[in-house]
Image (cartoon, rainbow, N blue to C red):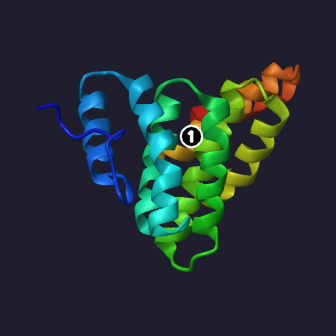
Amino acid sequence: VAPAGPSSAGATGPDVAAAVDEVKRLLDQGRITRAVDILGGILPAAAERHGAHSPVVRSLRKQYAATLMDNGEYRRALPELRMLAEEYAQESGAGATRQALQFHYEAAQCLEQLGEVAQALQEYRTLLPYFERYPDDPGRPLEIRRSIGHLLLAQGERGAAEQFLSRLLYD
């Protein structure tokens, strides 16, 4: 008997829990592309069943975006990350704010990987002051500064890039 997979559907649609289990198994096996396909396929059914902004769908969307990034599919990950950032930004509390910032950071990484230098630079510059406020992750502002320096270099702003990157020596 074959295990219940994401393509098996009952009267109420695909089995989200079975799909999540299958995705975990595939990721453990290094089969990221197949995991992406399953997550992308199950999201609409999960949204219909649980609501587009439900915790179940949000969790699936987070896994989907992370898996897309792991698979180098930055163009497909970008709208998911922006949607997640927007959802978290509408909530109150430090945890929601931090999550929103994290998704914006990941979106900036996607832009950088896609060669969207000006947009990535703008996103990183916007994020830097926020991440500088979080003492629990001192490495993140350094990563952002390094990315800004490299993006300035990519834009041909050698002097600004050198100045920015040299300040990293003192951080």
Which residue is at 66% across, 62% downward? Answer: 86
Side (left or right) of 68 relative to 63: right
Where on the picture, by quarter, is residue 72? top right
Where is residue 128? Give x, y as percent: 67, 51
Is any part of residue 55 visible from this angle? yes
Secondary structure under tag 1 reads helix
Q: Nearer the viewer, residue 66 or 164?
A: 66
**Residue visible at 51% across and 78% down in the picture:** 93
Image quadrant in which the C terminus is located? top right
**Which residue: 84% across, 20% down?**
158
Quick one: label 1, few (<14), some, or many (20+) residues within 10 Å?
A: some
| Residue 137 percent across, percent down from the top left | 44, 52
Tell how many labels.
Answer: 1
Give the residue furthest to the front: 11
State the residue in front, 10 or 51. 10
Disc 1 marks which amino acid? Answer: Leu
Rendered view: 1 above or below 31: below
Residue behind mark 1: 142
Q: Nearer the viewer, residue 28 or 143?
A: 28
In the drawing, does residue 148 fall left or right of residue 52?
Answer: right
Q: Residue at x 58, y 27 (%)?
A: 73
Residue 85 lies, in percent from the top left, at: 62, 58
Q: Which is nearer the eye, 23 or 148? A: 23
142 w.r.t. 113: above or below: below
Report whether residue 135 is seen. no
> Does 129 sit above or below residue 31?
below
Query: Quarter of the image containing the N terminus?
Result: top left
Q: Please give left or right for residue 30 compared with residue 151 in the image.
A: left
